[in-house]
Image (cartoon, grey):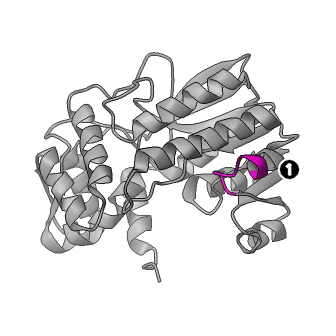
Amino acid sequence: MYVIAGVSGHTGSAAATALLADGRPVRVIVRDAAKGAAWKARGTEVAVASLDDRAALARALRGADGAYLLIPPGPLHEPDIAAERRRLSDAIAGAVADARPAHVVLLSSIGAELPSGTGPIAFVHALEGQLRATGVPATFLRAAFFMENWAAMLKGAIEGGALHHAVREGLRFSQVATADIGRTAARLLVEGPPQRERVVQLAGPADLTLADTAAAIGRVAGAPIEAVSVPPSALVESFIGMGAAREFAAMYGEMVEAMNEGRIAWQPGDLRRGSITLEQRIAELLAAPAPA
């Protein structure tokens, strides 16, 4: 039995779907039973648990041959994000220690080998360490920048003819689709546990610059898009202007600065690449209906 968290989001949904297509038994974790109804209709078991509820999460994980876990997106508009992330990580690691599934695949990030100076990536660094301390075999799936991160910027870029971001001009950085992350997580679960731990890095088909990204958007939209690199401080203020808490905005700015300085980079070892191109994913995002 494979237990999958995050099925209401992109990566967990893709992981569970891939396992079901392969004929594997799946138990999904949802926060309320109503969200699990569609998955139950597809033949999965449904466990109701919040990832910050150690006891409920441990019950969901018991007896698992493998489990896909992640820290869900943080509260952008609330203060003291760091404390909320610590509580969540403590609950996840505690549940793994209590339930002792045979294998955990954790959605981590490029740069997670660094303890600090990487913005929100530091939270998955901490959780990697907590899971390591449990002694449960773990695979840390360190993924690149999500292609879906561009979704909120597409409309403005197309209407204004320019894509603004704080990634420095000429920097090639990896971007990966969340569907590729989920499918890779499913493969890692089926491959089985390492003796103790392993790190698998996941990139998209090609590393791209900001100009490459703008050009991909332009090709899909049928109009030229200029790439405009701005200082990280400008990006921080832009996020705050859109309603994000200063703490969140500052962490995001710190992450981009670490990318620009080359501190967030691939390490020697297992580096895999997904198959979905940025242009394909942008086309899907633009074709998707607007949120209600």
Q: Residue furthest right?
A: 63
The relative height of residue 224 versus residue 251 in the rendered view (above or below) is below
The relative height of residue 264 versus residue 245 in the rendered view (above or below) is above
Other-residue count near label 1 (Cα within 10 Å), few / some / many at <14 / 14–19 / ≥20:
some
Let me know if residue 51 is in the magenta part: yes
Is disc 1 placed on a helix, strand or loop?
Answer: loop
Where, by quadrant of the figure, is residue 127 drawn? top right
Where, by quadrant of the figure, is residue 264 drawn? top left
Residue position for label 1? 25
Q: Which residues are magenta?
A: 50-56
Q: Judge by depth and name the residue closer to the eye, 292 or 236.
A: 236
**Left-right relation of 167 to 67:** left
**Left-right relation of 62 to 105:** right
Q: Position of residue 164 (x, y in %)?
A: 16, 57
Let me know if residue 181 is in the magenta part: no
The relative height of residue 153 versus residue 97 in the rendered view (above or below) is below
Q: Position of residue 26 (x, y in %)?
A: 81, 52
Q: Judge by depth and name the residue closer to the eye, 100 or 7.
A: 100
Q: Which residue shows up at 50% across the image and 31% down it?
A: 126
Q: Position of residue 2 (x, y in %)?
A: 80, 44
Q: Which residue shows up at 63% across the image and 51% down it?
A: 52
Q: Is residue 272 visible?
A: no
How many marks the image carries: the answer is 1
Q: Judge by depth and name the residue closer to the eye, 36 or 38.
A: 36
Which quadrant is the N terminus positioned in? top right
Q: Judge by depth and name the residue closer to the eye, 101 or 139.
A: 101
Q: Which residue shows up at 74% across the image and 30% down it?
A: 191
Q: Is residue 253 visible?
A: yes
Q: Position of residue 97 (x, y in %)?
A: 75, 32
Q: Amino acid at mark 1?
A: Pro
